[in-house]
Image: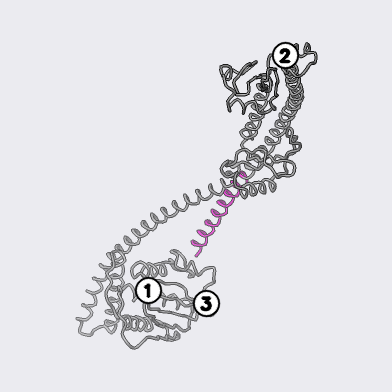
């Protein structure tokens, strides 16, 4: 028992050490993940501050462009007025100053057509319109921002003046739109790896987003869930977003950090699987080695017993040949027969067992009767067996050994007196053999250990009897043996369960 107790203590020590290692790994990895998350949050804040500065610059640029746009509108309107005054025959105003305005126009494109749409005069046209002879639908679309001016040059003719924004202003507007698109793209792509959503002040419109599935952003439920997660993790960052006023940047930890949170669990699972596989392999190797040791010891024991048994048989024959036969000769023959049975048992343990159809009822009766004669009259035996025969596939000599082991252990547990009860019951598919004693019982903490090699409650003993019984029932007979019940100070019941 001390051997097994020490082994159990070492198992607990190793388990505690393993838990400490796992706990330390979890603690370190969690701290690492938290540090990365804090660093990522700081980077997002720095990125948000940079975006706010960039947005401020874009806002200033846009305000400047708006002022330019107002001036451009005034220039275009003035040029249109000048052409109307110069070309319209119905007006008699002084045209000198208007001619000067027309002369100084070097950027505003204009086209004069007749009533049929034939182009009569052009100025400052873009390259793709210079060679056109007819004012077609494409040009009408291009010059649709301003209403054309009707001109009366005289002689009953009507002409139309089409004009547009200046080429410089158009190029400047394209540059600004490119800057806005680049700014939005920069927000989308440079969110330092963290998923980001930028909304207007009241949260009704998404201005931009980054590091999210663009195909899913069309799904309002997906956007709502993302915003809820972001709000639960971090407070939004407030920025001035160009001409939209206040805007809010919502963000959460990146998918990489989220995955790293599960790294300790994955690590533990991998280590656990590795240890489990290693344990199973070592256990299998240990059992295989143990089986070889058992078989070797059994064969050697059978071999060693064979010589003295043969010698004893010879001496018994000599005693029987004397004129006055020895009174104990018969008992000696029974004991020699018993030794032969023991030898046969050991030889069977060391080889592949062959199950034989055996009537278990007389086998149990003979075994228990033999044991009852060997113990004190103070031990009462109560054997409850059915009357009809019950044939099962057994190795008779080994099964007798199991009954002997259980009975001897029961006698040892009861001390100098007590009662042993053996009862056989059956179901449609199984047979149950319960062997009970009125001994000292087994504590709950020890019930699972009684079949372990080396476990014994006796001062003298190897702790192999129940271990051998378990091997014989489970490995050779494919049955089960276990402690059905045990109460300290009242006794124990072992159950053998066999298939029919």
- In front: mark 1 or mark 3? 1
Magenta span: 1-29
Marks 1 and 2, how far apart at CA: 123 Å
| Residue at image coords 65%, 19% | 112
* Coordinates of residue 104 in the picture (x, y in percent): 72, 12
Crowding near the residue tagged with mark 3, few <14, some 14–19, many ≥20 C-alpha atoms within 10 Å:
some
Q: Is the residue under label 3 in contact with that under label 1 (CB below 8 Å)?
A: no
Name which of mark 3 and mark 2 comes first in the sequence: 2
Which SS class for mark 2?
helix
| Residue at image coords 44%, 75% | 409
Q: Mark 1 points at which residue?
A: 402
Q: Nearer the viewer, residue 418 or 487?
A: 487
Quarter of the image where the C terminus is located: bottom left
Crowding near the residue tagged with mark 1, few <14, some 14–19, many ≥20 C-alpha atoms within 10 Å:
many
Could you tell whether 410 is left or right of 167 in the image? left
Marks 1 and 3, how far apart at CA: 21 Å
Q: Name the residue under label 2.
A: 102
* Coordinates of residue 116 in the picture (x, y in percent): 60, 24
Residue 369 sits above or below residue 455 on the image: below
**Residue farthest along the bottom direction in this orientation:** 387
Name which of mark 1 and mark 3 comes first in the sequence: 1
* Coordinates of residue 107 in the picture (x, y in percent): 68, 16
Q: Mark on residue 440?
A: 3
- Coloring basis for residues: one colour
């Amino acid at each position: 028992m001390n051997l097994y107790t020490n082994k159990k203590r070492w198992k607990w020590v190793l388990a505690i050490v393993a838990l400490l290692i796992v706990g330390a790994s979890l603690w370190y990895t969690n701290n690492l993940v938290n540090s990365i998350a804090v660093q990522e949050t700081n980077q997002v804040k720095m990125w948000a501050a940079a975006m706010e500065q960039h947005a401020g610059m874009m806002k200033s640029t846009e305000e400047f462009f708006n002022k330019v746009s107002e001036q451009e509108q005034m220039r275009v309107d003035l040029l249109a007025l000048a052409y109307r005054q110069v070309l319209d025959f119905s007006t008699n105003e002084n045209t000198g100053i208007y001619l000067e305005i027309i002369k100084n126009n070097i950027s505003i494109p204009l086209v004069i057509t007749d009533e049929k749409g034939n182009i009569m005069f052009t100025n400052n046209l873009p390259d793709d319109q210079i060679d056109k002879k007819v004012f077609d639908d494409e040009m009408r679309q291009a010059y649709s921002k301003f209403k054309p001016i009707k001109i009366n040059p005289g002689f009953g003719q009507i002409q139309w003046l089409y004009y547009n924004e200046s080429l410089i202003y158009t190029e400047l507007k394209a540059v600004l739109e490119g800057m806005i698109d680049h700014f939005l793209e920069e927000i989308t792509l440079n969110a330092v790896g963290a998923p980001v959503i930028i909304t207007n002040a009241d949260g009704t419109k998404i201005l931009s987003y980054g590091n999210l599935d663009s195909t899913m952003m069309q799904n309002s439920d997906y956007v709502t869930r993302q915003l809820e997660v972001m709000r639960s993790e971090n407070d939004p960052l407030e920025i001035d977003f160009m001409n939209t006023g206040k805007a809010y940047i919502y963000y959460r930890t990146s998918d990489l950090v989220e995955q790293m949170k599960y790294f300790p669990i994955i690590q533990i699972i991998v280590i656990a699987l590795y240890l489990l596989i290693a344990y199973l392999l070592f256990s299998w190797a240990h059992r295989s080695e143990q089986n070889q040791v058992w078989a070797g010891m059994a064969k050697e024991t059978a071999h060693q017993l064979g010589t003295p048994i043969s010698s004893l048989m010879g001496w018994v024959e000599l005693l029987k040949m004397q004129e006055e036969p020895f009174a104990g000769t018969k008992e000696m023959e029974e004991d020699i027969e018993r030794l032969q049975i023991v030898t046969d048992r050991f030889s069977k343990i060391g080889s592949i067992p062959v199950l034989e159809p055996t009537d278990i009822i007389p086998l149990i009766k003979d075994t228990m009767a033999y044991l009852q004669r060997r113990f004190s009259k103070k031990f009462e035996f109560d054997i409850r067996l059915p009357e009809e025969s019950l044939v099962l596939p057994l190795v008779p000599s080994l099964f007798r050994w199991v009954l002997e082991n259980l009975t001897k252990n029961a006698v040892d547990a009861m001390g100098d007196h007590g009662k042993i009860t053996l009862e056989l019951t059956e179901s449609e598919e199984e047979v149950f053999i319960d062997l009970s004693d009125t001994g000292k019982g087994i504590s709950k903490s020890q019930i699972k250990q009684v079949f372990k090699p080396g476990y014994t409650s006796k001062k003298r003993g190897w702790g192999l009897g129940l271990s051998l019984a378990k091997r014989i029932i489970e490995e050779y007979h494919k049955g089960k043996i276990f402690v059905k019940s045990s109460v300290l100070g009242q006794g124990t019941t072992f159950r053998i369960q066999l298939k029919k």
